[in-house]
Image: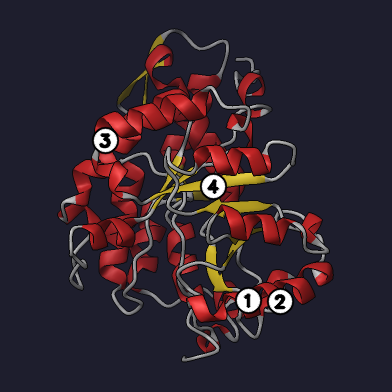
Amino acid sequence: MSTTTRTSEVFSSVQTGWQLGAPLYVPALHPDLLKIANAEKIPLIKSMIICTEDAVAEKDLVQSIANLKHFLPLIQRIESRYRFIRVRNPETLKRILDLPGIENIDGFVLPKFDLSNSDAYHRILIHTRFRIMPTLETIDVFNPSAMRDLALTLASSDLKHNIVLLRIGGNDLLNLISMRRPRGVSLYETPLAHVIAQLVTTFKPLGFPLSAPVYEYLDDTETLDREIRSDLAYGLIGKTAIHPTQIPMIQRHYRVAQMEYEQALDILNTDSPAVFKRHQAMCEISTHINWARQIVARYDYFGLDDSDRCQTEKSAQHSSFERSLLKNADSFSIFAPYAN
């Protein structure tokens, strides 16, 4: 059977978002910002988001931008390591774009993104090469019509191909309804479950992948485990980590089961029949081809896994390789330099 696949026609143009892995939030004032960016500390991360918004108090914004001015020229280009800056608003974005060394950044996270500020961001970014990740976290997210209008606006925008993925701001959305998820409760056991489903069915058909919200309880790995499984079931791509210790668990879930990988390869094989059986499951090329492309993309970035090993690793300690990568991670805090 031929090994020719249908992947080449899409992977050159489709941005999967899987290459970002589990991005790590790092405040712009973090004392180890440069070491993290240059892989001298916490080398396991695939991407980082340098935050000038929620992780930085208003009174510290000027200092955080001054820190970026010193930091940006010192960033080393490292293959398959991505750095984004989460700006505060369009005005902050303009200031940051004028900083020396900004060319060392891959792109920007655009918070509180909706139709009220999309034009402002468009005017600033239209003539740049930066990738962007707009975050859906305003009250408009609860309005399906507003989200449909935003999706259509982005689909016709000159910046469409700059969008890596859309982020869902879970905590901001819960705050809008005066909620914080209790410990032990998955996001999919809150009112946001149907909101996430609505966002997926609104944006993904137009070509925009979405990423999963953060999980803020560091010691509750059982719920994080359940939530990541639900993230994948809802078709979300990637999940931001708030601490390095979350990254191995998140990224282990993105490894591909052997059976799914074999099914995906057969679906993408140009010599396969339109419908066939593989591992006791019906595989239909016309309806499963986009799923197969996602599986192969995950494999490209995270490799293979098997259910037996996953079950063992759930309750086991990190592998020796992961433990070596996590060296010094205990000293990391998203709230640094104020607290550990």
Residue at (26%, 35%) from the top-left corner?
198
The earlier-in-sequence mark between 2 and 3 is 2
Please give the residue where the numbered disc 3 appears in the rendered image: 198
Q: Tag 1's secondary structure?
A: helix
Which residue was labeled with disc 4?
Answer: 133
Horizontal side, residue 277 vs residue 191: left or right = right
Q: How many numbered dots are placed on residues in this image? A: 4
| Residue tagged 1 | 62
The image's mark for residue 66 is: 2
Vertical placement of 34 versus 269: above or below?
below
Closest to the camera, between mark 1 and mark 4, is 1
Q: Kindly indicate whether the residue at mark 2 contacts the one at mark 1 (C-beta within 8 angstroms).
A: yes
Q: Secondary structure at mark 3?
A: helix
CB of mark 1 within 8 Å of CB of mark 4?
no
Quote the CA–CA distance across marks 4 and 3.
Answer: 19 Å
Q: Amino acid at mark 1?
A: Val
Nearest to viewer (mark 2 / mark 4): 2
> Which label belongs to residue 149?
none
- Residue at 56 percent of width and 68 percent of height: 52
Name the image quarter holding residue 313. bottom left
> Which kind of residue does numbered mark 2 sit on?
Ala
